[in-house]
Amino acid sequence: MGDHPVAGEHHHPSAATALGALLLLPSELLHEILLLLAVPELLRVRSVARPLSSLISSPDFRRLYHLSSASSGPGPAAAWVLLFKKLPPRDAAIRGFHGPSGRWFRIPVSAILAPAVPPGEDLYFLAASASSFLFAANGRRELVVVDLTARAARRLPPSPLGPRGTSSWRRFGLKLVADPPGSNRFRFLFAELVNNTPFLFEYRSETDTWQESEAVLAEGAAEAADPDGDGGTYLCAAHAGADCVMVYAGPRADERPVFFRPRFPNAAGAGHGERLHVYGDGSAAVVRSAAAAGEDPTSRSRGKVVTGVELYGVGAVGGDWELVASVPGGLVEGFRKPYAVMTGLLAEREGVVRLVLISNCRGAWNLVWLSYDRARREWRWVPVPDWGGSKGLNMAGIAVSSTFSRLWPLAAPAPAPSSSSSSHR
């Protein structure tokens, strides 16, 4: 399946003429049609004719679209899987899979990156939130942020740890947050062990400055408000299989971060068979695998298949992992494919936990997207089709964003005045 390009801001008179009949529809019906489109499609429609551009950019329509995205139900809802393929900066593009429409979109960023990234730079995609996409530049050992709404890129000042190459950034230990939500301002947080002591580092785009805080050991288990609701953040400062060091930063700026080492119950992180541990937003997924049929179980290069997935959460800061839910066996059967290597990412927003597993088998990549709705206690598997470019893919970063659908292009400046989504429970 091919991906769909996102057009720039160009108005085409011939296209506007072809859409004449559409523009004659009642405004209520036209709103209903446009509300069904994904954001990249709206960007393309917005570039076709000025009447549609004015309608889509209006505050009333933006409010309706945001409400529609927020109430689209469990599962993929307004979420995206965003993938970056290692290419020269002049060809750089994000591939975005939109769950509700079941399609891939190509989001070009090469022209935006050009002023901030020199030719030949090696980029790695770290995170996304709303209109902000964060990259690590390996050659210059610095961070670069792309603002899609402003169509601008800029380099961030070095963190207190100094210049860092792409291999220094760990997916489980970092988070990009639009602050306030829906804006192009953001906070970037990451946790790291410094001389065996957990530290929290935070960059604020509003002030263009970094802050660092040494985390203190949590004294027993203390109830924490929902991190998705109060602004609290969980980050994994270090991990080795089932062992990890979690850092929790509360919502108040004067609140010192704490760290703790949660343990899995009943040796969930150990035992027979392969186990992959994926951490994110105060949750952990344990992916169990076994040798594929016909493979030598003693071979290091054997093919494997997933046999089960369990979701764990920390009910309290300083507490241990608690089993939340297991993916039903019938659902696992649907996405069970042989693989050689696998990694994953985990994110939660508005009570929906999203788990993406990325695996490779003989040069072919496979993506599995699972979501768990806490209120409904419901798992969903979102089939992700191949866009036709994954064979031999040199992947350079992946992210999940549930705020990208709330991205909105800046309204065109006013002219100067004249002188006179299958589900299982």
Image (spheres, rainbow, N blue to C red):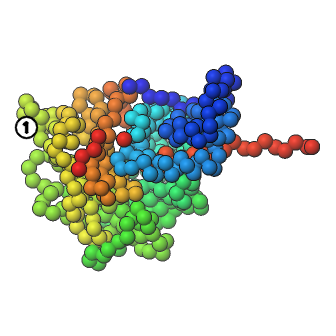
For residue 238, which quarter of the picture? bottom left
Q: Residue at x 57, y 32 (%)?
A: 44
Locate residue 137, reporting x and y percent: 47, 43
> Quadrant of the rendered structure where residue 102 is?
top left
The correct choice, above or below, for 325 with respect to 251 in the image is above
Point out the residue furthest to the bottom here: 219
Residue 12: x and y, percent? 67, 25
Nearest the viewer among 42 and 282 is: 42
x 72%, y 44%: residue: 413
407 left or right of 192 in image: right
Which residue extends farthest right?
Answer: 420
Q: Secondary structure at mark 1?
A: loop
- Residue 199 in sight from this viewpoint: no
Q: On the rendered image, what quadrant is the N terminus found in?
A: top left
Residue at image point 7% right, 30% down: 294
Residue at point 42%, 48% (across, down): 72
Looking at the image, residue 408 sits to the left or right of residue 86; the answer is right
Q: Position of residue 362 (x, y in %)?
A: 24, 28
Is residue 337 shown to the viewer in this render? yes
User: Can you identify the residue that label 1 sits on?
Assistant: 297
Residue 304 x %, y %: 15, 37
Q: Is residue 221 left or right of residue 403?
A: left
* Residue with the most extreme front position: 26
**Three-letter amino acid code of the residue under disc 1:** Pro
The one of 137 and 424 positioned closer to us in this rendering: 424
Left or right: 157, with 369 as reference point:
right
Q: Nearer the viewer, residue 406 or 206?
A: 406
Q: Residues within 10 Å of mark 1 (few under 14, many from 20)?
A: some
Kindly indicate the quadrant of the structure image that contains residue 336: top left
Report how many numbered discs are placed on residues in the image.
1
Is residue 8 depicted above or below 134 in this figure?
Answer: above
